[in-house]
Amino acid sequence: MHLTFDDGPHPHWTPFVLDQLKLYDQKATFFCVGDNIQRHPEVFDRIRREGHSWGNHTMRHESGWTAGTFAYLRSHLECDALTGTGLFRPPYGRLTKGQARAIGRRDRIVMWDVLTGDFDRSRTAEACWKATEQALRPGSIVVMHDSEKAGERLEGLLPRLLAHLSAQGWKSEAIPMPRWEPAGPLSGWNQTPEDSHTRLALRS
């Protein structure tokens, strides 16, 4: 399976996540906002040093449904200059069909099938954990958030999730990075938007 974290790097919550992953010997993929990479380059460097994957989450966390196509693709390219791995996740899971086609020509668009809900301030960490535990399957792509907004729930959720994976004998693997790793094309990972793990929220 694949644990993934959106919206960082954050100076407190990303190191918390990295410490927990190291404790349980698990790897993850971090979809990073370009502005946050520039604010916290030392945290971004730690993600890379510790053997995790990372991807593009736009420069300023724009929604594809409200940003114009040109502005959205420019934001994608600005963040790509900082990440450069060929992995992309749209903020909120929202893209227009035109944006998805353009980005899908060069990147793998990575969605999810387990939404923990840690971003929702009306939920408790316990509620997030129960929903996550029920949805987990081998091969799942789980999304959490290393952000100020999600931190309180992430702090209660992540250690329980990692302990559960350890008890089940499950491993979280970093998603291969098609444009970073030197081994060449990776079969099964260079997918079109329509082939992504969970269907995109597309608008015409």
Image (cartoon, rainbow, N blue to C red):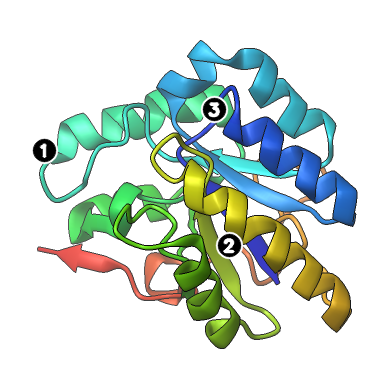
Instruction: Name which residue lies at 83% across and 41% down.
Output: 51
Percent across and percent down for residue 163 are: 80, 67
**Residue type at mark 3?**
His
Above or below 36: residue 116: below
Tag 2 near tag 1, CB within 8 Å: no
Instruction: Name which residue lies at 19% across and 30% down.
Output: 71
Above or below 2: residue 100: above
Using the image, tell me which numbered label, if any, was put on residue 128: none
Give the residue pinned by disc 1.
Answer: 68
Using the image, tell me which numbered label, if any, was put on residue 190: 2
Instruction: Name which residue lies at 22% across and 45% down.
Output: 63
**Residue type at mark 1?**
Gly
* Left or right of 82 in this view: 42: right
CA separation, marks 3 and 1? Answer: 27 Å
Give the residue pinned by disc 3.
Answer: 10
Q: 179 or 161, which lies in front?
A: 161
The quadrant of the rendering that contains the N terminus is: bottom right
* Left or right of 104 in this view: 162: right
Which quadrant of the structure image shows residue 66?
top left
